[in-house]
Image (cartoon, rainbow, N blue to C red):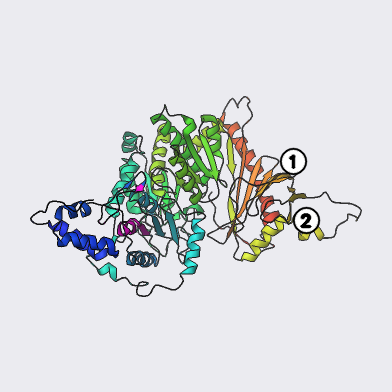
Amino acid sequence: MSSDQTKTSSPSDELLKSIDLWLKWDQCETTRKEIEELKKNSKWDDLEVRLSHRIQFGTAGLRAKMGSGFASMNELTVIQATQVAIGFDARHQSHQFARLAAALFAHEGIHVYLFDSITVPTPFIPFTVKKLQCQAGIMVTASHNPKDDNGYKVYWENGAQIISPLDAQIAQSIEENLEPWKNKAWNLDIFNDKTSKLISDPIEKIRDLYMSNLSKLCFFPELNSSTPLKFVYTPVHGVGQPYAERAFAAFHFQPFISVDEQKNPDPNFSTVKYPNPEEGKETLECAIRTANKHNADFIIATDPDADRFALAERDTSGSSETGWRILSGNQLGALLGWWRWFTWRNRNPDVNVKDVYMLYSTVSSYILKSIGEVEGFNTIDTLTGFKWLGNRSNELINDKKHALFAFEEAIGFMCDPENVLDKDGISALAIGSEMCAYIKSIERTLYEQLDHLSSLYGYHINNNSYVICNKIDVMLKMFDRLRHYDQRKDQHTTNETTKSEKKEPEILVQYSNKIKSHLDYVYPKSCGKYGITGIRDLTVGIEADFRGEGKDEKPTLPCSSSTQMITFYFDNGCEITIRASGTEPKIKWYSEIRKKKPMKNPSEENPMIDDEQFRKQTKDELDELVEQVVQEFLQPKQDQLIERETTAK
């Protein structure tokens, strides 16, 4: 870059301001001296070229000639490119935590996009990271945990949550820097510095851009604007209300009915015991009362940080005790997955389906896989958590594939992976409401649509729940017992069998990977009347088919000794996974049985009777097995585990 530019008579005020900012910020002697010399010699045109615009991210990131000025590659522009987006929910201390984090970055000369004026949904942070090309994102939130909890969620430059090895590297860095930085930690003076541009609030830009992108996923605006359906919405004392209102408007709906007791942020979650709509009728009690008052058709809800979405439909059949049928995460995943495929395919009829993908976590229903097998698109299962679903979706998008949808049974839905690589309750709310309007327009209920999907893709029946375990040693002993089933206490009780009578041996699995090659594990062979045909243990890294020789293999999914998770495969086609939660003191189970109804002549008077009877028989079979597994494997009474109080009936 030449410095022999023709002198102009006088520089603009903007240029002088840029020069002052550069000299104020730049601590590199070489590039600082270059700008000082140009200013001294009144090389205003050269300074205009160097300072009037910023280096931009391109297909290869930042790339430009090295030299001084905002338009070039240098120490200051590299530091300035290292930006973060920070948001916070409505919990106690969230705003302060966010400000402390932002100030630390700013003190190091790193630009921070801090949503300082308003609480935001968690999905706004991964969206901001991508759209403003930040190097990282932080969301201060504990999602739907109890009011005394809080958390710190980290995203990387791709807009997805961090995974290995980044998580370990960050943890190591924390350990190496435990002493707070002198004169920087707890120093919020920068917020009073009106001349500093290191912290800025992007709320208006990001909110408008998010809603603009979301509106592109609206397929039936005329239907939405004219539907007579009434929706009641609750953010469960969280951040969702203003964003849900805008999302509804973006999809051309008339305003929904608000739950007055819960529409404003309240860090105490005053009206609920658990601020998690996944818990069912207890959390949605206020919404149900409001919906009954207004004779509404649907209840839509997001959790406190608005990354999860729940949906309930008025029950006109009278089969539910509340008068409302609250859909499970797997049922919603089936419906939203079908809807994303149906609407996307209608808009893209000529795209090769072999380039289309949907994803689900391994503890969720396999319904997407069944739909994909019929429709031709691909499906991928990942470990539990949207950090895996998001990063895998990002890989697909980078490979020029179409990642349409991902979900997890804990009412988490990623409906727009191109823009948000995490679960997103706001987009799911808008898309799900349009789906409701469409299904009602073809004179079906949501449950009738689920039955229709079952007739096309097979029945997928689930029974998921949890027990509360407040003692880590009890949880670890339970999983150890399942891996050493020959040593469990009931094996040593006296019985009428003689010593010469040998009990049928349990399945022995030789553990042969490189991590712990000296260990042998013995897993249960049956539970009640149901035989176990194989297991997958992602804690120790075994996948074994008991129907063969019992030889173990390395699972295809990543394994981790820090998480407890075992899947059992049963001879009736059922799968049950037992897993210790990573965020709550819970031992969870996830189960599914998949069956197709035999072809036969339906009942002449009511063909739906056979469908309902088949569904009930299948569900009864699953419920019986799950009850056996809970009592025999988890042993809640013996270990004094607290059984779940709420239900999603």
Question: Of residues 225 and 539, which is closer to you in this image?
Answer: 539
Mark carried by residue 547: 1
Q: Quadrant of residue 80?
A: bottom left
Task: State how far apart marks 2 and 1 are (Cα).
Answer: 19 Å
Q: Pick out the residue farthest to the left.
A: 9
Q: Image point 58% across, 52% down: which residue?
A: 465
Q: Is 62 inside the magenta-drawn segment?
A: yes
Q: Pick out the residue farthest to the bottom.
A: 182
Which residue type carries mark 1?
Answer: Arg
Q: Secondary structure at mark 1?
A: loop
Question: Of residues 159 and 144, which is closer to you in this image?
Answer: 159
Q: Position of residue 460 (x, y in %)?
A: 58, 39
Earlier-in-chain disc, 2 versus 1:
2
Q: Is 307 inside the magenta-drawn segment?
A: no
Q: Position of residue 135 (x, y in %)?
A: 38, 55
Q: Position of residue 482 (x, y in %)?
A: 70, 55
Question: Of residues 47 and 325, which is closer to you in this image?
Answer: 47
Q: Position of residue 503 (x, y in %)?
A: 84, 51
Q: Which residues are magenta?
A: 61-87
Q: Which residue is mark 2?
A: 486
Q: Image point 62% across, 31% down: which residue?
A: 597
* Label 1 crowd bin: few (<14), some (14–19), many (20+), radius 10 Å: few
Q: Is residue 600 left or right of residue 63?
A: right
**Residue 280 appears anywhere in the view:** no
* Label 2 crowd bin: few (<14), some (14–19), many (20+), radius 10 Å: some
Which residue type carries mark 2?
Answer: Asp
Q: Secondary structure at mark 2?
A: helix
Question: Of residues 159 and 12, which is closer to you in this image?
Answer: 12
Q: Is residue 620 left or right of residue 550?
A: left
Mark carried by residue 615: none
